[in-house]
Structure formats: C-alpha cells, structure tokens
Image: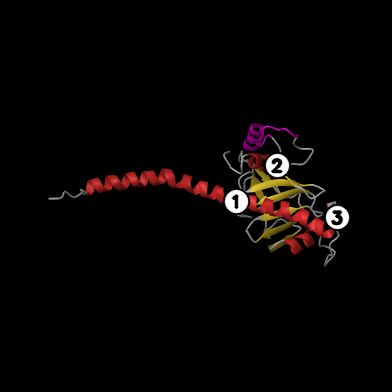
C-alpha cells in the first residue's frame, strides 16, 4: 500500500518552500530590475552617441555651437528642436524637470539631494520610458533617468549622468572631471561611496561591460 504524506509533512514542506521563496524572490526581482535599467541606459546612451554625430553631419557642422535649427517660439531651445526632429519624444516637460524627473533623488549613501537634474535646461521622456535632461545648446551634462519619475530615484541605480562635448561626442566624463587612465577600481569606489563625481557610475559601467555589481 502506497504511503501518503501526512498533514504535518505537507505543512513542513510548504514552510520550507515559503522560506526559500522569501530568500530568493527579492534577489531575483532585484536582478531583473537592475538588468532592465541597464538595458534602457545602454540603449539611450547609444542612441544619443549615434544620433548626435549623424545629425551634425547632416547639418554640416563641426561643433554643436554652430547648430541652428528653426525654432517655433521664443521659449524653444536648440535642444527642443533637436529632440523633436531626431527622437521619438512622448512627453516634453519644457524647462522644468517636473513630470519627467523626480524632484528629489538620493545618492547611493541614501543622502537626499534635491533637484539632482536641475543643471539641465530641457527635459523629455522618450518612447523607451527614459527621461533625458539636456542643456539648452545640447553641450554639457546629460542626464538619463531610465524609468523617469518612478522609484528608486537613486544616482547610479536609475539616474545616470554623462557629458556631451562640443564636437558631439557623448562621453562618460568631461575633460575636467576624470583624467585619462583612471582605474576601474577607483571608479567603482567613487560610484559606491559618492566620493567622486556624478559621472563615475556611467564610466564604471562602460568599463565593466555594463554590469552593475556595486
């Protein structure tokens, strides 16, 4: 005669399964969330890195300073005209980050920092859900929030910063921030501790094959 499991044995088995699920599911969800964020970051970064030089070639300019796209109003900037012409913009937040970026972000140390993206002048949400913040003439610091206003709103997790040069090159750092030859371990520590500059997380991710292990 086949022996059946007792109620006590079933309860023990279910308890074990429950404990395993509690321990593993959050980790799996975190990894999935992280990979999704990195995918959007990489896609957005690559899209701008490819589009800006191509647009400059089309306009026959060697410096973004020479960009002269037609504007529809006195309040529109070159960045607005550029984004509307070359990108699939689903939301234009104008000159305020409200609605595109969160009002308050935290660094990895969980320190609150208001208006993290406020140094940008124009704000948009793209078709892939990422929010981008640009300076009015496109050159300078370039902000990417991979899931716009949604949490966790943490620098290095869903908010990232890069730099656009006069020549239209999208880099992980400006010339006056990181020197050539910085070691990846140094970049990693700067990103973890926020002892470095905003751009260190993107620089680290690029050198680490887009793997977020911090």
Residue receiving disc 3: 61
In the rendered structure, are the residues bearing label 2 and label 1 in contact, judged by CB atoms less than 8 Å apart?
no
Callout in the foreground (2, 1): 1
- At label 3, counting other C-alpha atoms closer than 10 Å, the crowd grade (few under 14, some 14-19, many 20 or more) is some
On-image quarter of the C terminus: top right
Q: Residue furthest left?
A: 1
Residue receiving disc 2: 199
- Left or right: 25, with 134 as reference point: left
Question: Residue 100, position in %: x, y?
Answer: 67, 57
Q: Tag 1's secondary structure?
A: helix
Question: Residue 2, position in %: x, y?
Answer: 15, 50
Residue receiving disc 1: 39
Viewer can see residue 121: no
- Asked whether 183 falls inside the magenta stretch, the response is yes
> In the image, what residue occupies the spot 76% across and 54% down?
52
- Asked whether 13 falls inside the magenta stretch, the response is no
Q: Tag 3's secondary structure?
A: loop
- Left or right: 49, with 153 as reference point: right
Q: Residue furthest bottom?
A: 72
Query: Distance from label 1 to label 3 (Cα)?
Result: 31 Å
Question: Residue 6, position in %: x, y?
Answer: 20, 48
Q: Earlier in the sequence, mark 1 or mark 3?
A: 1
Q: Earlier in the sequence, mark 3 or mark 2?
A: 3
- Work out whether residue 132 or residue 103 is closer to the camera in this orientation and state it: 132
Query: Distance from label 3 to label 2 (Cα)?
Result: 27 Å
Callout in the foreground (1, 3): 3
From the viewer's perspective, is residue 82 above or below residue 165? below
Q: Which residues are magenta?
A: 179-195
Query: Distance from label 2 to label 1 (Cα)?
Result: 18 Å
Q: Tag 2's secondary structure?
A: loop
């Amino acid at each position: 005669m086949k022996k059946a499991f007792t109620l006590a044995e079933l309860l023990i088995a279910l308890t074990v399964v429950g404990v395993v699920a509690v321990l593993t599911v959050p980790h799996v969800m975190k990894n999935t969330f992280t990979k999704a964020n990195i995918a959007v970051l990489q896609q957005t970064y690559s899209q701008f890195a490819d589009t800006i030089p191509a647009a400059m070639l089309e306009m026959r300019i060697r410096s973004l300073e020479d960009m002269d796209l037609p504007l529809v109003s006195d309040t529109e900037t070159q960045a607005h005209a550029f984004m509307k012409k070359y990108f699939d913009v689903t939301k234009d937040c104008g000159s305020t980050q409200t609605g595109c970026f969160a009002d308050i972000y935290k660094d990895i140390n969980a320190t609150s920092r208001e208006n993290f993206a406020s140094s940008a002048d124009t704000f948009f949400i793209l078709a892939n859900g990422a929010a981008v913040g640009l300076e009015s003439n496109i050159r300078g610091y370039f902000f990417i929030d991979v899931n716009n206003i949604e949490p966790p709103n943490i620098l290095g997790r869903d908010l990232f910063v890069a730099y656009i040069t006069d020549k239209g090159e999208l880099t992980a750092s400006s010339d006056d921030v990181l020197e050539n030859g910085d070691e990846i371990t140094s970049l990693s520590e700067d990103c973890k501790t926020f002892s470095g500059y905003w751009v260190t997380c993107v620089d680290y991710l690029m050198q680490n094959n887009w793997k977020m292990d911090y």
